Every structure is written in C-alpha cells, then in structure tokens.
Image: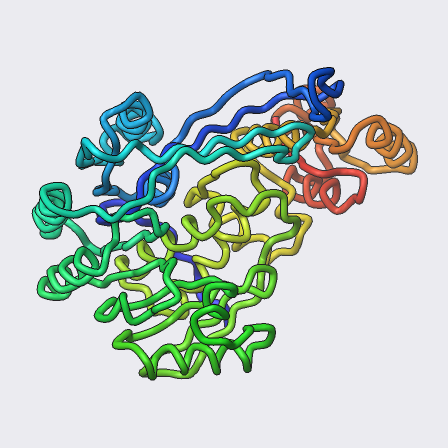
Amino acid sequence: MTMPLNADFSGLTVLVLGDVMLDTWTYGHIERISPEAPVPVLRTDRRREMLGGAGNVARNIAALGGRAILVGVIGDDHCGEQIRQSARSQSLVPGAIDARLVVSPHQPTIHKMRYVAGGQQVLRVDEETVSPVEGAVAARLLDDFERALPKADVVILSDYAKGVLTDAVLEQAIAAAKARQKVVVADPKSRDFSRYNGATILTPNRLETLIATGIDCTTDAKAEEAGAWVLTTTHLDAVLITRGADGVSVVSRDGPAIHVAGRARSVFDVSGAGDSLVATLALALASGQPLAEAARLANYAAGIVVEKAGTATVSARELVEAFHDTRHGPARAKILPVDGVIEHVARWHAMGQRVGFTNGCFDLLHPGHVTLLAKARAACDKLIVGLNSDASVRRLKGPDRPIQNELARATVMASLGQVDLVVLF
C-alpha cells in the first residue's frame, strides 16, 4: 500500500558543503553558418545566470521549502559576486539560502556557460582552474562549516571534483558532523568511495558506480551486487544508486534492498537532476521519514527535473503533483493551477515548441468539441484548455448548470489525447 506523501520541509535546515559554481544559460536561434568558419551563428535572445554545483543543491532546498546554509569557495572576481547576488535572489523566501563563501585569492570562480538553440545545447564552455583548497582557505572553509553545524538538521557533501572536498576537508567535515550526530549525505565524484567513510549514505549515479565497482547496474540484481560491494569496502550505512530511467536502488546494512522505478515521462535535460535528488533525499531524512520513503520522494524529484530545461529545481507542490500522477493516472496530472501551467509553458518554449490555448465550458462533451479540439491541436505542438469553473458556468448558462462539476469536466477533458494541460478559470 502506498503511503501518503509528506513534502512539508518547512523549518528544516540543510548544511551544504561543496564545489560552488556559476551556471550561465544563453538562449537564442541559429539561422545561418558563419562566413568566417564552418560554424553556426547563434543570435542570442535571453540569458540566465544561476547558482550551480553545490549552489544548485542549495537552490533546490530553498525551492522545496527548506533553508540552506551554503559553504564553499569562490574567486575574487565578477562571477564570485554574481554567485553572492544569486544566493540572495534565487529563492522565494528571503534568507532561504545563507551563503558563507570563502574568497580564494588564487583560484577564479568556476563558470559553466551553456548555449542553447531550438531547445538543444549547441556549445558548453567551462572556465575553471581545478586545484585543491589548502592552507588558510581550507582552514576558513572548515571553520565556517563547523560554526554552521549546530543549526543544521542534515549535511550534504556535494562533490564536483573541483578541489573543495579534498581528502583532508572530507575527513574533518565528516568527523565534525558525526560528532554532532548529523545525518551526512555524500554525492561523490571520486572512483574511491572510501574517501567518504563515515557518511550516512552515498548517492552515486550508474556510471560512477560502474567506475568504482566494475559492476554495471543494468538490473536490480546488479544494483544490489554493486551496493553490497560498496558497503563491504567502505564505512557507510547505505548507498543509493541513481539509474536514470530505471529509477533508484538503495542498499543498506540493516534492511533489504529497495528499488524504485523511474518516474520521468519525457527527458529533456538532465542538468542538475542529481542535485534535486540529493536535496530531496536529505530533507526527507531530516524530516524523520524512513529511507524507503525518502528514496521514493527523491526519485520523484529527479523525474520532474529531467523534464525541465536548464539547471532546474523542484518544488514541494510539484512533488505532490507527481504523487497524484501515480495515484490517479496521467489524466489528473494534466490538471494544474495557473502557476503550474506557466512553468510548463516556459519549459515548452525553451524546447522551441508552439503552445496553443482554447477555452470553454465543455459541460456536455460532444463530437463537435472533439473535432474542434483536434483542429486546435493540429495548429500547435502543445494545447492548453481553459475550463470554466462551476461558478462561471452558472453565470453563463443558468442556476441548473453545470451538469458535471468542474473536477469531472476537467478529468474528462484531460483524458483526451489532443489536450496537454487543463486549467480552471
């Protein structure tokens, strides 16, 4: 029996330590090849800058309703200042991201620039100098981390192999967190999983697991084998292996293996999916949910984010909607409030798709309606139907209407293949 979904993470604080970077997304269109070289010319339309790496983990925590304390290293440069500004602005609740960033005089801020046309990445440019943090910078980093520990309900170690989580930093950070009995979620980028010894749970993806163990997690049985290998060679309590479309597998020392099927309906961009999964997993564990339920929530989060464009986040509302999708079927998942529809429209536009809109009462659906909806859908890639609410129908058609209430009418409308989303108005 499926348990009720608990996505209330308000009041929870997550301490995130790791590689912070700036993500820049430049969107445009390509109409010609350059006369100077055989390369496409991208004419830019808009640009977005946001927290990346460990910063994207913090963004997801804030989007889910929690509070993030972000500890990392930036350079003394423009991109570093952009990260500070983004930490202040990229959350709905002021102060939801508390950025405690150490400025390194020797390393520039890591900057990843992606260029997109027609919904596809055409180029990625990385500006980075990867070297291990040490000396005064490492000491300040650990001091900020340990000062923040008393306020944290859970700790995330977000390793992008950019130099922040050295062996020494990892060892001291994990020891300090365990001394305060904090759950530690480690997202690895090293083939040597023993570097994270002492963490509560490790969250490698399928490729990282293959490199570390030599076992390709193509089946549940292989995932269990790989997880068991990790636990026998490290001092970890559990390992959660993300397997893309095949979902996630959890192997722990004190219980049977858990396998959760994939949830994504369509994959558009996998950027940041791991960050969303780790943030959701940590918050769920901090809220007291058992590992199986935390893994299920984290899997929902990853399935939602891969359907979005860019370095995206997931909200608590979207988790609840995903849960409704599994309980009530795909038709109910198409019925969204206005803000949800706006998010989908932005995503479809980013993919270069044409979005259409039509509206009506649709109290008694007849063949004429179906024909008109089919013609409307033929003129666009995605069709949204605005459905008059019960109060609106009464004003238009009299006190005895509608015959079917708004939820029934919306469910019928969403069941039609020509309709992609339904919104009440």
The outermost residue toward the front is 36
Residue 121 in sight: yes
Considering only vertical position in the picture, is 22 above or below 72? above
Can you give x and y, in whole percent of width and height, for residue 290 in the image?
33, 69
Q: Nearer the viewer, residue 253 or 21?
A: 21
One can see residue 359 in this view: no
Residue at point 22%, 60% (across, down)? 167
- How has the structure been colored for display? rainbow
Q: Nearer the viewer, residue 256 or 11?
A: 256
- Residue 389, by quadrant, is top right
- Residue 338: image quadrant is top right
- The residue sitting at 23% across, 41% down in the picture is 72
The image position of residue 182, as x and y in percent, is: 17, 62
Residue 166 is situated, as x and y percent measured from the top left of the image, at 24, 55
Query: Total number of numbered labels?
Result: 0
Relative depth, front residue between 237 and 368: 237
Classify residue 288 by image quadrant: bottom left
Please tell me which residue is depicted at 58% across the width and 38% down the height of the picture: 336
Which residue is located at x 28 percent, y 74 percent? 236
Q: Position of residue 227 (x, y in %)?
A: 43, 77
